[in-house]
Image (cartoon, grey):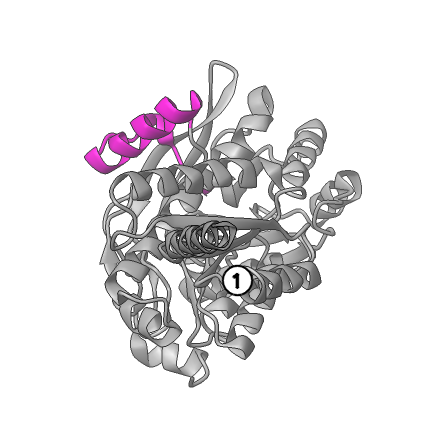
Amino acid sequence: MRARNYLVGAAFALLAGGMAHSALAQDIKIGEINSYSLLPAFTEPYRKGWQLAVEEINAAGGINGKKLVVISKDDGGKPADAQTAANELVSSEGVAMLTGTFLSNIGLAVSDFANQKKVFFLAAEPLTDAVTWAKGNKYTFRLRPSNYMQAAMLVEAASKLPAKRWATIAPNYEYGQSAVAVFKKLMSEKRPDIQWVDEQWPPQGKIDAGPVVQAVAQANPEAILNVTFGPDLVKLVREGNTRGLFKGREVVSFLTGEPEYLDPLKEETPEGWIVTGYPWYSLKTPEHDAFLKAYQTKYNDYPRLGSIVGYQTIKAAAAILAKAGSTDTDKMIAAAEGLSMPSPFGEITFRKIDHQSTLGAFVGKTAQKDGKGVMVDFSYKKGADYLPGDAEVEKLRPKD
Protein backbone atom coordinates (compact mmCIF):
# COMPACT_ATOMS: atom_id res chain seq x y z
CA MET A 1 0.00 0.00 0.00
CA ARG A 2 2.79 2.39 0.96
CA ALA A 3 4.63 1.52 -2.26
CA ARG A 4 1.47 2.21 -4.27
CA ASN A 5 0.95 5.57 -2.54
CA TYR A 6 4.58 6.45 -3.18
CA LEU A 7 4.23 5.64 -6.87
CA VAL A 8 1.00 7.63 -7.16
CA GLY A 9 2.63 10.59 -5.37
CA ALA A 10 5.67 10.40 -7.61
CA ALA A 11 3.44 10.32 -10.67
CA PHE A 12 1.56 13.40 -9.50
CA ALA A 13 4.86 15.16 -8.79
CA LEU A 14 6.12 14.37 -12.27
CA LEU A 15 2.82 15.49 -13.78
CA ALA A 16 2.87 18.75 -11.81
CA GLY A 17 6.48 19.34 -12.77
CA GLY A 18 5.68 18.69 -16.40
CA MET A 19 2.73 21.06 -16.27
CA ALA A 20 4.91 23.74 -14.69
CA HIS A 21 7.56 23.20 -17.35
CA SER A 22 4.89 23.35 -20.04
CA ALA A 23 3.57 26.61 -18.63
CA LEU A 24 7.07 28.08 -18.59
CA ALA A 25 7.59 26.90 -22.14
CA GLN A 26 4.62 29.02 -23.17
CA ASP A 27 6.41 32.19 -22.08
CA ILE A 28 8.55 34.19 -24.49
CA LYS A 29 11.28 36.03 -22.63
CA ILE A 30 12.87 39.26 -23.79
CA GLY A 31 15.97 40.75 -22.17
CA GLU A 32 16.01 44.48 -21.52
CA ILE A 33 19.04 46.57 -20.50
CA ASN A 34 19.16 50.24 -19.57
CA SER A 35 20.91 52.88 -17.45
CA TYR A 36 18.21 53.12 -14.80
CA SER A 37 20.38 54.23 -11.90
CA LEU A 38 22.36 56.74 -13.99
CA LEU A 39 19.63 58.46 -16.01
CA PRO A 40 16.30 58.14 -14.17
CA ALA A 41 14.71 61.19 -15.83
CA PHE A 42 14.50 59.26 -19.09
CA THR A 43 14.64 55.63 -18.00
CA GLU A 44 11.89 55.66 -15.38
CA PRO A 45 9.27 56.87 -17.90
CA TYR A 46 10.86 54.46 -20.38
CA ARG A 47 10.28 51.57 -17.95
CA LYS A 48 6.67 52.63 -17.46
CA GLY A 49 6.25 52.69 -21.22
CA TRP A 50 7.48 49.17 -21.80
CA GLN A 51 5.55 47.83 -18.82
CA LEU A 52 2.35 49.26 -20.31
CA ALA A 53 3.19 47.61 -23.62
CA VAL A 54 3.74 44.20 -21.96
CA GLU A 55 0.41 44.54 -20.15
CA GLU A 56 -1.43 45.37 -23.39
CA ILE A 57 0.26 42.59 -25.36
CA ASN A 58 -0.57 39.91 -22.80
CA ALA A 59 -4.13 41.19 -22.33
CA ALA A 60 -4.60 40.76 -26.08
CA GLY A 61 -3.45 37.13 -25.98
CA GLY A 62 0.32 37.47 -25.90
CA ILE A 63 2.51 36.56 -28.87
CA ASN A 64 0.81 33.86 -30.90
CA GLY A 65 -0.85 32.75 -27.67
CA LYS A 66 2.30 32.79 -25.56
CA LYS A 67 2.82 35.16 -22.64
CA LEU A 68 5.48 37.84 -23.03
CA VAL A 69 7.90 38.23 -20.11
CA VAL A 70 10.51 41.01 -19.97
CA ILE A 71 13.58 40.49 -17.78
CA SER A 72 15.26 43.83 -17.09
CA LYS A 73 18.78 44.69 -15.97
CA ASP A 74 20.53 47.96 -15.04
CA ASP A 75 23.85 48.63 -16.79
CA GLY A 76 24.76 51.53 -14.46
CA GLY A 77 25.96 53.54 -17.45
CA LYS A 78 28.95 51.23 -18.03
CA PRO A 79 29.53 49.40 -21.33
CA ALA A 80 31.27 46.45 -19.64
CA ASP A 81 28.37 46.02 -17.21
CA ALA A 82 25.94 46.13 -20.12
CA GLN A 83 27.80 43.33 -21.88
CA THR A 84 27.82 41.31 -18.65
CA ALA A 85 24.07 41.85 -18.31
CA ALA A 86 23.56 40.81 -21.93
CA ASN A 87 25.53 37.62 -21.39
CA GLU A 88 23.53 36.75 -18.25
CA LEU A 89 20.23 37.37 -20.02
CA VAL A 90 21.19 35.13 -22.93
CA SER A 91 23.06 32.35 -21.15
CA SER A 92 21.19 32.15 -17.83
CA GLU A 93 17.72 33.50 -18.60
CA GLY A 94 17.41 32.16 -22.15
CA VAL A 95 15.89 35.32 -23.60
CA ALA A 96 14.79 35.33 -27.24
CA MET A 97 16.24 38.78 -27.91
CA LEU A 98 17.88 41.78 -26.28
CA THR A 99 16.34 45.24 -26.20
CA GLY A 100 17.05 48.66 -24.73
CA THR A 101 20.13 50.76 -23.89
CA PHE A 102 20.34 54.55 -23.72
CA LEU A 103 23.90 55.86 -24.05
CA SER A 104 25.44 55.45 -27.49
CA ASN A 105 28.66 53.84 -26.26
CA ILE A 106 26.59 51.25 -24.38
CA GLY A 107 24.38 50.61 -27.38
CA LEU A 108 27.49 49.93 -29.44
CA ALA A 109 28.85 47.57 -26.77
CA VAL A 110 25.64 45.51 -26.70
CA SER A 111 25.46 45.58 -30.51
CA ASP A 112 28.99 44.15 -30.64
CA PHE A 113 27.97 41.44 -28.15
CA ALA A 114 24.91 40.62 -30.28
CA ASN A 115 27.05 40.37 -33.40
CA GLN A 116 29.59 38.07 -31.79
CA LYS A 117 27.02 35.85 -30.07
CA LYS A 118 24.51 35.94 -32.96
CA VAL A 119 21.71 37.34 -30.80
CA PHE A 120 18.93 39.64 -31.99
CA PHE A 121 19.25 43.16 -30.50
CA LEU A 122 16.63 45.90 -30.79
CA ALA A 123 18.35 49.13 -29.71
CA ALA A 124 15.83 51.52 -28.21
CA GLU A 125 17.53 54.86 -27.64
CA PRO A 126 21.25 55.09 -28.55
CA LEU A 127 21.45 57.73 -31.28
CA THR A 128 24.93 57.46 -32.76
CA ASP A 129 24.87 56.75 -36.48
CA ALA A 130 27.44 54.01 -35.98
CA VAL A 131 24.74 51.68 -34.56
CA THR A 132 23.20 51.17 -37.99
CA TRP A 133 26.00 52.33 -40.30
CA ALA A 134 29.75 52.24 -39.57
CA LYS A 135 29.39 49.52 -36.92
CA GLY A 136 26.06 48.11 -38.06
CA ASN A 137 25.51 44.36 -38.21
CA LYS A 138 22.79 41.92 -39.24
CA TYR A 139 21.70 41.29 -35.64
CA THR A 140 21.09 44.92 -34.60
CA PHE A 141 18.03 47.08 -35.31
CA ARG A 142 17.26 50.55 -33.94
CA LEU A 143 13.99 52.29 -33.05
CA ARG A 144 14.81 55.97 -32.33
CA PRO A 145 15.58 58.44 -35.12
CA SER A 146 19.37 58.63 -35.31
CA ASN A 147 21.70 61.61 -35.01
CA TYR A 148 21.74 61.88 -38.80
CA MET A 149 17.94 61.99 -38.94
CA GLN A 150 17.55 64.53 -36.14
CA ALA A 151 20.42 66.65 -37.49
CA ALA A 152 18.82 66.69 -40.94
CA MET A 153 15.53 67.82 -39.38
CA LEU A 154 17.23 70.59 -37.41
CA VAL A 155 19.40 71.70 -40.34
CA GLU A 156 16.26 72.19 -42.40
CA ALA A 157 15.34 75.05 -40.04
CA ALA A 158 18.85 76.13 -38.97
CA SER A 159 20.09 76.67 -42.52
CA LYS A 160 17.48 79.42 -42.95
CA LEU A 161 18.95 81.47 -40.10
CA PRO A 162 21.13 84.42 -41.11
CA ALA A 163 23.86 83.42 -38.63
CA LYS A 164 27.24 82.57 -40.14
CA ARG A 165 29.49 82.16 -37.07
CA TRP A 166 28.63 78.99 -35.14
CA ALA A 167 29.89 77.37 -31.93
CA THR A 168 29.06 73.90 -30.59
CA ILE A 169 28.63 72.50 -27.09
CA ALA A 170 28.34 68.74 -26.70
CA PRO A 171 29.17 65.96 -24.22
CA ASN A 172 32.53 64.38 -24.97
CA TYR A 173 31.53 60.81 -25.76
CA GLU A 174 30.14 58.87 -28.72
CA TYR A 175 26.70 60.52 -28.87
CA GLY A 176 27.91 64.11 -28.61
CA GLN A 177 30.78 63.58 -31.04
CA SER A 178 28.49 61.90 -33.58
CA ALA A 179 25.78 64.58 -33.29
CA VAL A 180 28.21 67.48 -33.79
CA ALA A 181 29.97 65.78 -36.70
CA VAL A 182 26.81 65.06 -38.67
CA PHE A 183 25.20 68.45 -37.92
CA LYS A 184 28.33 70.27 -39.10
CA LYS A 185 28.51 68.13 -42.23
CA LEU A 186 24.88 68.61 -43.23
CA MET A 187 24.82 72.29 -42.26
CA SER A 188 28.00 73.10 -44.18
CA GLU A 189 26.62 71.34 -47.26
CA LYS A 190 23.57 73.61 -47.20
CA ARG A 191 25.47 76.71 -46.07
CA PRO A 192 29.09 76.76 -47.32
CA ASP A 193 29.40 80.32 -45.95
CA ILE A 194 29.27 79.14 -42.32
CA GLN A 195 32.30 79.36 -40.02
CA TRP A 196 32.71 77.04 -37.06
CA VAL A 197 34.40 79.28 -34.53
CA ASP A 198 34.45 77.18 -31.33
CA GLU A 199 33.83 73.68 -29.95
CA GLN A 200 33.29 72.86 -26.29
CA TRP A 201 33.44 69.24 -25.10
CA PRO A 202 32.43 68.96 -21.42
CA PRO A 203 32.43 65.45 -19.92
CA GLN A 204 29.00 63.82 -19.95
CA GLY A 205 27.21 64.40 -16.64
CA LYS A 206 30.02 66.57 -15.26
CA ILE A 207 29.81 69.90 -17.07
CA ASP A 208 31.57 72.87 -15.50
CA ALA A 209 29.19 75.35 -17.08
CA GLY A 210 30.99 78.58 -16.14
CA PRO A 211 34.18 78.03 -18.17
CA VAL A 212 32.16 76.51 -21.05
CA VAL A 213 29.89 79.55 -21.27
CA GLN A 214 32.84 81.93 -20.96
CA ALA A 215 34.78 80.18 -23.74
CA VAL A 216 31.82 80.24 -26.12
CA ALA A 217 31.14 83.91 -25.37
CA GLN A 218 34.76 84.79 -26.13
CA ALA A 219 34.45 83.14 -29.56
CA ASN A 220 31.53 85.51 -30.21
CA PRO A 221 29.36 83.20 -32.35
CA GLU A 222 26.09 84.31 -33.91
CA ALA A 223 24.54 80.89 -33.26
CA ILE A 224 25.14 77.88 -31.01
CA LEU A 225 24.51 74.18 -31.48
CA ASN A 226 23.79 72.50 -28.14
CA VAL A 227 23.84 68.74 -27.62
CA THR A 228 23.88 68.61 -23.79
CA PHE A 229 20.89 67.09 -22.00
CA GLY A 230 19.67 66.25 -18.49
CA PRO A 231 21.39 67.94 -15.51
CA ASP A 232 24.14 69.24 -17.82
CA LEU A 233 21.53 71.13 -19.83
CA VAL A 234 20.05 72.72 -16.70
CA LYS A 235 23.50 73.92 -15.60
CA LEU A 236 24.34 75.24 -19.05
CA VAL A 237 21.06 77.14 -19.39
CA ARG A 238 21.34 78.61 -15.90
CA GLU A 239 24.91 79.80 -16.43
CA GLY A 240 24.15 80.96 -19.96
CA ASN A 241 21.14 82.97 -18.79
CA THR A 242 23.16 84.53 -15.97
CA ARG A 243 25.98 85.57 -18.29
CA GLY A 244 23.76 86.59 -21.20
CA LEU A 245 25.23 83.99 -23.56
CA PHE A 246 21.99 83.38 -25.41
CA LYS A 247 20.91 86.99 -25.75
CA GLY A 248 20.83 87.99 -29.40
CA ARG A 249 22.08 84.54 -30.47
CA GLU A 250 20.25 81.71 -32.20
CA VAL A 251 20.39 78.30 -30.52
CA VAL A 252 19.71 74.94 -32.14
CA SER A 253 19.45 72.09 -29.66
CA PHE A 254 19.09 68.31 -29.91
CA LEU A 255 16.53 66.72 -27.53
CA THR A 256 15.77 69.87 -25.48
CA GLY A 257 12.06 69.77 -26.32
CA GLU A 258 11.66 66.37 -24.66
CA PRO A 259 9.65 66.79 -21.42
CA GLU A 260 12.25 64.96 -19.31
CA TYR A 261 14.81 67.66 -20.19
CA LEU A 262 12.54 70.66 -20.76
CA ASP A 263 10.43 70.35 -17.61
CA PRO A 264 13.30 70.82 -15.11
CA LEU A 265 14.15 74.20 -16.68
CA LYS A 266 10.79 75.68 -15.56
CA GLU A 267 10.91 79.49 -15.60
CA GLU A 268 14.54 79.36 -16.75
CA THR A 269 13.47 77.90 -20.09
CA PRO A 270 15.07 79.95 -22.89
CA GLU A 271 12.64 81.05 -25.59
CA GLY A 272 13.03 80.56 -29.30
CA TRP A 273 15.52 77.68 -29.36
CA ILE A 274 15.03 75.35 -32.34
CA VAL A 275 14.71 71.87 -30.82
CA THR A 276 13.63 68.28 -31.30
CA GLY A 277 11.22 67.03 -28.67
CA TYR A 278 7.79 65.68 -27.75
CA PRO A 279 4.90 68.13 -27.21
CA TRP A 280 2.54 65.49 -25.84
CA TYR A 281 0.16 68.16 -24.50
CA SER A 282 -0.66 69.47 -28.00
CA LEU A 283 -0.88 66.28 -30.08
CA LYS A 284 -4.31 65.39 -31.44
CA THR A 285 -4.21 62.16 -33.42
CA PRO A 286 -6.15 58.92 -32.81
CA GLU A 287 -2.93 56.91 -32.33
CA HIS A 288 -1.48 59.28 -29.77
CA ASP A 289 -4.83 59.84 -28.03
CA ALA A 290 -5.13 56.09 -27.42
CA PHE A 291 -1.60 55.85 -26.02
CA LEU A 292 -2.04 58.96 -23.86
CA LYS A 293 -5.29 57.70 -22.36
CA ALA A 294 -3.84 54.28 -21.55
CA TYR A 295 -0.68 55.77 -20.04
CA GLN A 296 -2.48 58.33 -17.89
CA THR A 297 -5.03 55.75 -16.75
CA LYS A 298 -2.30 53.35 -15.61
CA TYR A 299 0.14 55.84 -14.07
CA ASN A 300 -1.85 59.00 -13.32
CA ASP A 301 1.02 60.90 -14.92
CA TYR A 302 1.86 62.39 -18.30
CA PRO A 303 4.25 60.64 -20.69
CA ARG A 304 7.78 61.70 -21.50
CA LEU A 305 9.56 60.78 -24.69
CA GLY A 306 11.12 57.89 -22.78
CA SER A 307 7.59 56.56 -22.29
CA ILE A 308 7.07 56.47 -26.06
CA VAL A 309 10.44 54.80 -26.68
CA GLY A 310 9.92 52.11 -24.03
CA TYR A 311 6.37 51.43 -25.19
CA GLN A 312 7.22 51.19 -28.87
CA THR A 313 10.37 49.14 -28.32
CA ILE A 314 8.39 46.28 -26.76
CA LYS A 315 5.53 46.68 -29.22
CA ALA A 316 8.07 46.35 -32.02
CA ALA A 317 9.72 43.34 -30.39
CA ALA A 318 6.33 41.64 -30.09
CA ALA A 319 5.48 42.41 -33.73
CA ILE A 320 8.79 40.91 -34.86
CA LEU A 321 8.29 37.75 -32.79
CA ALA A 322 4.68 37.39 -33.95
CA LYS A 323 5.62 37.66 -37.63
CA ALA A 324 8.58 35.30 -37.23
CA GLY A 325 6.40 32.73 -35.48
CA SER A 326 9.58 31.60 -33.79
CA THR A 327 12.38 32.67 -31.46
CA ASP A 328 14.98 31.58 -34.01
CA THR A 329 17.33 34.51 -34.57
CA ASP A 330 17.53 34.26 -38.35
CA LYS A 331 13.75 34.05 -38.62
CA MET A 332 13.37 37.13 -36.42
CA ILE A 333 15.86 39.06 -38.58
CA ALA A 334 13.96 38.09 -41.72
CA ALA A 335 10.68 39.12 -40.08
CA ALA A 336 12.04 42.48 -38.90
CA GLU A 337 13.53 43.59 -42.22
CA GLY A 338 10.90 45.73 -43.91
CA LEU A 339 8.33 45.17 -41.16
CA SER A 340 5.76 47.95 -40.72
CA MET A 341 3.68 48.54 -37.59
CA PRO A 342 1.59 51.20 -35.85
CA SER A 343 3.03 53.56 -33.24
CA PRO A 344 1.71 56.51 -31.22
CA PHE A 345 3.30 58.72 -33.92
CA GLY A 346 1.83 56.78 -36.85
CA GLU A 347 3.06 53.85 -38.92
CA ILE A 348 6.77 53.04 -38.87
CA THR A 349 8.92 50.61 -40.81
CA PHE A 350 12.27 48.93 -40.11
CA ARG A 351 14.32 49.43 -43.27
CA LYS A 352 15.92 46.31 -44.71
CA ILE A 353 19.01 48.18 -45.94
CA ASP A 354 20.25 49.36 -42.51
CA HIS A 355 17.75 48.12 -39.88
CA GLN A 356 16.84 51.72 -38.95
CA SER A 357 13.20 52.42 -38.13
CA THR A 358 11.37 55.33 -39.73
CA LEU A 359 10.01 56.65 -36.43
CA GLY A 360 10.17 60.44 -36.71
CA ALA A 361 10.55 63.38 -34.35
CA PHE A 362 8.93 66.71 -33.63
CA VAL A 363 10.82 69.92 -34.42
CA GLY A 364 9.71 73.24 -32.99
CA LYS A 365 10.73 76.10 -30.72
CA THR A 366 10.97 76.46 -26.97
CA ALA A 367 8.68 78.86 -25.12
CA GLN A 368 7.34 79.46 -21.62
CA LYS A 369 3.76 78.94 -20.54
CA ASP A 370 2.63 79.37 -16.93
CA GLY A 371 6.23 79.21 -15.70
CA LYS A 372 6.95 75.99 -17.57
CA GLY A 373 8.87 75.16 -20.72
CA VAL A 374 6.84 74.03 -23.75
CA MET A 375 7.31 73.40 -27.46
CA VAL A 376 5.48 75.67 -29.91
CA ASP A 377 5.35 76.07 -33.69
CA PHE A 378 6.20 72.39 -34.02
CA SER A 379 5.64 69.84 -36.77
CA TYR A 380 6.19 66.12 -37.01
CA LYS A 381 9.00 65.05 -39.30
CA LYS A 382 8.61 61.55 -40.71
CA GLY A 383 11.82 59.60 -40.30
CA ALA A 384 11.73 58.17 -43.82
CA ASP A 385 12.05 61.68 -45.26
CA TYR A 386 15.38 62.29 -43.49
CA LEU A 387 17.29 59.10 -44.27
CA PRO A 388 19.80 58.64 -47.10
CA GLY A 389 19.03 56.29 -49.97
CA ASP A 390 20.30 52.75 -50.40
CA ALA A 391 23.33 53.71 -52.50
CA GLU A 392 24.66 56.05 -49.83
CA VAL A 393 23.92 53.59 -47.01
CA GLU A 394 25.89 50.89 -48.81
CA LYS A 395 28.94 53.17 -48.62
CA LEU A 396 28.39 53.83 -44.92
CA ARG A 397 27.59 50.30 -43.71
CA PRO A 398 29.85 47.25 -43.83
CA LYS A 399 28.60 44.16 -45.59
CA ASP A 400 27.13 41.52 -43.28
Element type at marker 1? loop
Q: Nearer the viewer, residue 378 or 33?
A: 33
Q: Is residue 289 magenta?
A: yes
Q: Is residue 107 left or right of residue 384?
A: right
Considering every residue shown, the one lying at the far front of the view is 1
Q: Nearer the viewer, residue 143 or 323?
A: 323
Which amino acid is tagged 1?
Thr
Q: Residue at x 27, y 67 (%)?
A: 324
Q: Quadrant of the C terminus?
A: bottom left
Q: Residue at x 29, y 53 (%)?
A: 63
Mark 1 Cα-neighbour bin, 10 Å: few <14, some 14–19, many ≥20? many
**Residue 131, image x, y percentages:** 50, 67
**Residue 116, image x, y percentages:** 55, 78
Considering every residue shown, the one lying at the far left of the view is 286
What is the tally of numbered marks visible in this picture? 1
Q: Residue at x 79, y 43 (%)?
A: 211
Q: Does 366 appear above or below 251?
A: above
Q: Nearer the viewer, residue 29 or 361?
A: 29
Q: Is residue 259 magenta?
A: no
Q: Which residue is mark 1?
A: 128
Q: Is residue 356 left or right of residue 119?
A: left
Q: Which residues are magenta?
A: 274-302
Residue 305 seen in this snapshot: no
